Amino acid sequence: MDLTNGRNIASSAPARVPGAWWKYACGALMCYVIYGAFFIADGAAGFGKGGDNARAVFFHVPSAVLSSLCYFIGVVYAGMYLFSSRYNNLETDAKSSIAMELGLLFCTLATITGSIFAGIQWGVFWNWDPRETSIVIMLLLYASYVVLRLALAGRPEVRARLSAVYALVAVVPAQFLIWAVPRLLAGMHPTDTLQTSSGLSLHYKLVLYPAFLAFLLVFVWLFQLRLRAIKLVSRREAVS
């Protein structure tokens, strides 16, 4: 059955179950990151709790990066749905929505880990630093997208079109909040730790760089699981 021209996601064939090898590798890599965060990386000078507070970087930074990457992926699929007749189907819409949902998840994780870091490092869990303010607005953008889709749950075609338009319209302020605002406005949040040769010691690089890959693999895994779940529900509804 032709997936590219079909309008109903339920018409697509069941997704092939991907090989398990990379998932085992993902689990092993995440275990290494967790172990490395506490037993390979040492406490960093200038941070609270004897430098242990700096270990938040292994979980906070990958989550923050993915919160932006997810939005970009969601926008790509939204554009494909709106402007490509080949991908103008509900499967493409589902992929866009999944990326946005996972973006909300990783944005929430980045907010929580950043708040914990701030509470230990600066003595207050929230002080409306430019970076903190921008991530709250990002959370609102993601949450608004989810609410929009929930409000149109019974109208899949309208939901797909309006949510795609929303994603495209909000991409400029979303990326501006993530990349520009924290660099234009002074705040306590460090912005150049990963960009300078002296910003990270070797034992931090040995953990942080694998952490980026581990979190990315987790995203891919969650994306596949969510897509398969949506397809199964759609097929069940089509049969019934």
Image (cartoon, rainbow, N blue to C red):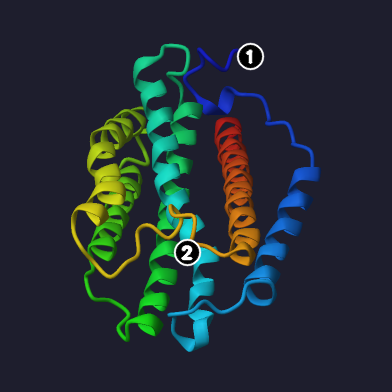
Whole-angstrom CA distance, mark 1 to mark 2, is 43 Å
Q: Residue at x 74, y 36 (%)?
A: 18
Q: Nearer the viewer, residue 23 or 42?
A: 42
Percent position of residue 95, x then y: 49, 34
Quadrant for the N terminus in the image: top right
Q: Nearer the viewer, residue 8 or 162?
A: 162
Q: Mark 1: which amino acid?
A: Met
Q: Is residue 117 above or below residue 130?
A: below
Q: Residues within 10 Å of mark 1 (few under 14, many from 20)?
A: few
Quadrant for the C terminus in the image: top right
Q: Is residue 19 above or below residue 210?
A: above
Q: Is residue 183 above or below residue 76?
A: below
Percent position of residue 157, x then y: 36, 27
Count of numbered circles on the image:
2
Toward the front, the furthest residue is 198
Q: Residue at x 32, y 57 (%)?
A: 139
Percent position of residue 32, x then y: 72, 63
**Badge 1 is on which residue?**
1
In the rendering, which numbered label is found on residue 60? 2
Element type at marker 2?
Answer: helix
Element type at marker 1?
Answer: loop
